[in-house]
Amino acid sequence: MTLKRSKYWDTRELHQHLLERNDAAHVYGKNDCALFAADGIKAMTGVDIAEDFRGYAGPTGAQRAIAKVTGGTTVEDAAVYCAKKYALPELEHPLEAKRGDLVLLAHEGELLLGLIHLSGSCAVAPGAAALRRIPLSAIKRAWRVGNV
């Protein structure tokens, strides 16, 4: 299945997603890095790439969901699974990621999933109390989301 971004993915759908989550705290199973990114992709494309993972609570629940679905242990394993299932091409050069693309970030000693911000100048992912902007230099892997 190839994803296609809606006509107004940037000015409406992704913009609204970022506004809604801007002041939302990180909560496993509701607004963690993986579901934040998947919800943004769903807003842009109408497809829930995290449907196989939803329904967990807490960090242990997240790890169990990843293990059950992918056999792995990290959000990287979840991203690779979703990218393969939904035909998201991985970028050979991750820093070529564009606005709205899915990215794996190595930031402050942890792996996170996020999206490239509409400005194109940073990645975004949920933080303790609000959405945080993460430098593009933290991108470890990236996948193109639909047509750009």
Image (cartoon, rainbow, N blue to C red):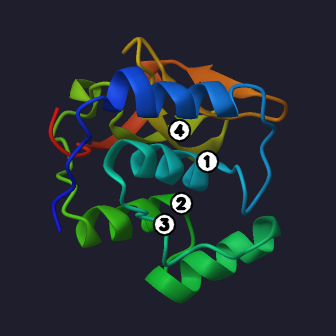
User: Which residue is label 1 attached to?
Assistant: 33
- Evaluate whether residue 62 shows in this view: yes
Q: Give x and y (percent) for residue 126.
A: 68, 37
Marks 2/4: CA–CA distance: 11 Å
In the rendered image of this protein, does residue 107 appear above or below residue 72?
Answer: above
Residue at image position (72%, 57%) is 30
Q: Earlier in the sequence, mark 2 or mark 1?
A: 1
Query: Dot 1: what SS?
Result: helix
Does the CB distance between marks 2 and 1 fall below 8 Å?
yes
Q: Earlier in the sequence, mark 2 or mark 4?
A: 2
Q: What is the three-letter code of the residue carrying label 3?
A: Ala
Residue 138 in the figure: left or right of residue 128? left
In this rendering, which labeled residue sits more in front, label 3 or label 2?
3
In the rendered image of this protein, does residue 89 appear above or below residue 87?
Answer: above
Does the CB distance between marks 3 and 4 fall below 8 Å?
no
- Image quadrant in which the C terminus is located: top left
User: Which residue is label 4 attached to?
Assistant: 106
In this rendering, which labeled residue sits more in front, label 2 or label 4?
2
Nearest to the observer: residue 109 or residue 81: 81
Marks 2/1: CA–CA distance: 9 Å
Marks 1/4: CA–CA distance: 12 Å
Q: What is the three-letter code of the residue carrying label 2?
A: Val
Residue 5 in the figure: left or right of residue 75? left
Nearest to the observer: residue 53 or residue 137: 53
In this rendering, which labeled residue sits more in front, label 3 or label 1?
3
Marks 3/1: CA–CA distance: 12 Å
User: Which residue is label 2 attached to?
Assistant: 75
Q: What is the three-letter code of the residue carrying label 4?
A: Ala
Residue 92 in the figure: left or right of residue 113? left
Q: Give x and y (percent) for residue 53.
A: 56, 75
Res. 8 image quadrant = top left
Q: Give x and y (percent) for residue 55.
A: 69, 76
